Image: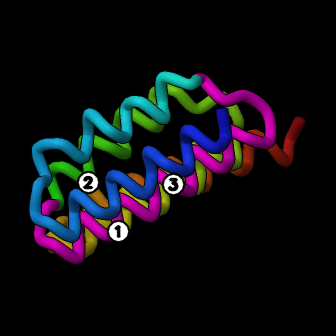
Amino acid sequence: MLSIAETQYEIARLLIKEGRYDRVLPEMRKILDLNFQGENEQLVAKSSSLIARLLVENKQVALAHALLDETLARMKQRENVVSLLKIKAYLYKSEGKLQKAIDTLERAVEIERQGIQQ
């Protein structure tokens, strides 16, 4: 299944390169639908983060938010949620939505604190 995920990730990267943004989210959903658990969940979070950054570089911020939101909804491990929230804050910052960036970072810190207290 990792091989499938790697291939889907590469497809998404190439679609961005070609400017075929309408196909990026459906291709990334194929990775999310594999429902990776444990350490492999981190690979999914990282893939989504990298694709989101590529989307931002190509001025597709709304699509990057949509991808991160869908990925966040599937994450079970705290560190992956925190990592994705930090990327989401970066998106807000790049849009000039500084209060949303602050709120998102505060949420990430709160989740990290909960992990330390346990």
- The residue carrying mark 3 is 47
- The residue carrying mark 2 is 64
Mark 2: few, some, or many residues within 10 Å (few <14, many ≥20)? many
Residue 3: numbered disc: none
Q: In the image, what residue occupies the spot 58% across and 32% down?
A: 75
Q: In the image, what residue occupies the spot 37% across and 57% down?
A: 88
Residue 105: % across, % down = 47, 59
Kindly identify the amino acid type of the residue bearing the numbered disc 1: Arg
Q: Main secondary structure of the magenta part?
A: helix
Kindly identify the amino acid type of the residue bearing the numbered disc 3: Ser
Q: Is residue 70 above or below residue 33?
A: below
Between the C-alphas of marks 3 and 2, the distance is 12 Å
Q: Is residue 107 left or right of residue 69?
A: right
Between the C-alphas of marks 1 and 2, the distance is 7 Å
Mark 3: few, some, or many residues within 10 Å (few <14, many ≥20)? many
Mark 1: few, some, or many residues within 10 Å (few <14, many ≥20)? some
Q: Which residues are magenta?
A: 35-60
Which of 96 and 65 lies nearest the eye of the viewer? 65
